[in-house]
Amino acid sequence: MSRRGLMEQDLSKLDVTELHPLSPEVISRQATINIGTIGHVAHGKSTVVKAISGVQTVRFKNELERNITIKLGYANAKIYKCEDEHCPRPMCYKAYGSGKEDCPMCDVPGFENSRMKLLRHVSFVDCPGHDILMATMLNGAAIMDGALLLIAANESCPQPQTSEHLAAVEIMRLQHIIILQNKIDLIQENVAINQHDAIQKFIQGTVADGAPVVPISAQLKYNIDVVCEYIVKKIPIPERNFVSPPNMIVIRSFDVNKPGFEVDEIKGGVAGGSILRVCLFPF
């Protein structure tokens, strides 16, 4: 391990032809899978990203004032599993922010002396749910390898953007979807069961047919460990090419350089998402 508990990288000895999206040298520092959050406005997309990654994706003043996502949000998270096979699931799964060390200690009672293993480094694309922002959502869908479809348990299903977002990812031929029945803490058990039946009826014949439906409370972080387990088990890692010429899709850009900077002072980098092809080295 190097400083901050991240995997040691010796660029002079690194053979990029042997790298793959789950190589410890890669996922220690870089996300290798893009997962989108889709669904109707105010159904909890940004909240579930925060519950998993610890990052608030709603950052701009107009977003905070209206409490909705307007621009595409981004946040990275690492997903771990306790190395002790006796650690009970789903509690053995845990998510932290992207800067977390690679082998933290397990926090499940009785297993505090066990280490956790890094399984995934995920980049979340938080899409707006409002109908007038559909074009922004489609931009985000272009880079998704999988999606979390948020459905609020305290509203009827489907809502308008629930249907539209699901149709959009179907057009994009996205096949790996996990449905999150959010705000489960706000309703009675019989209401949750009836809505679960409505969700199953809604997804019949769609790309989400057969997808798992996980009841959660993103605000209370209830069942977030189950979501982490399903991400690991149900959304496969896509192929990444580390040896061909660079290829990436840019869906948002930020100018972090102030006017008047010298050429050798200009900075930049990838803040979210994952590179589809090539391995970039620092100069």
Image (spheres, rainbow, N blue to C red):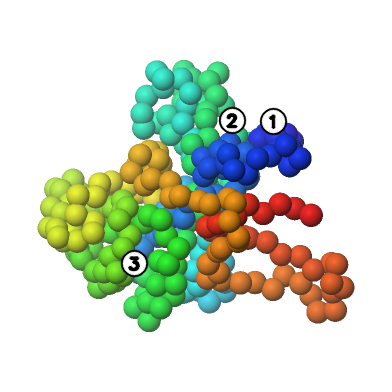
| Mark 2 closeness class: few <14, some 14–19, many ≥20 residues within 10 Å | many
In this rendering, the answer to whether 260 lies above or below 114 is below
Mark found first going from the N terminus, 2 or 3: 2
Question: Secondary structure under badge 2?
Answer: loop
Q: CA distance from mark 2 to mark 3?
A: 36 Å
The numbered disc on residue 103 is 2
Q: Earlier in the sequence, mark 1 or mark 2?
A: 1
Crowd around label 3: few <14 · some 14–19 · many ≥20 (10 Å):
some
Q: Nearer the viewer, mark 1 or mark 2?
A: 1
Q: Can residue 109 be seen at all in this image of the molecule?
A: yes
Residue at 19% from the left image edge and 49% from the top image edge: 210
Q: Which residue is mark 1?
A: 1
65 or 97, nearer to the observer: 97
Quadrant of the drawing holding the N terminus: top right
Q: Position of residue 241 (x, y in %)?
A: 53, 52
Q: Is residue 167 above or below residue 124?
A: below
As shown in the figure, which amino acid type bears the numbered disc 2? Cys
Label 2 close to label 3 by CB (< 8 Å): no
Please name the residue shown 66% across and 35% down the image: 7
Q: Position of residue 190 (x, y in %)?
A: 14, 48
> SS for tag 3?
loop
Looking at the image, is mark 3 or mark 1 nearer the viewer?
A: 3
Assess whether mark 2 and mark 1 are in contact (beta carbons under 8 angstroms): yes
Is 272 on the left or on the right of 89, as rendered? right
Q: Is residue 54 left or right of residue 236?
A: right
| Residue type at the position of mark 3 | Met
Q: Secondary structure at mark 1?
A: loop
Q: In the figure, 87 relative to 153: above or below?
A: above
The residue pinned by badge 3 equals: 172
Q: Quadrant of residue 233?
A: top left
Measured Cα–Cα span from mark 1 to mark 2: 9 Å
First in sequence: mark 3 or mark 1?
1
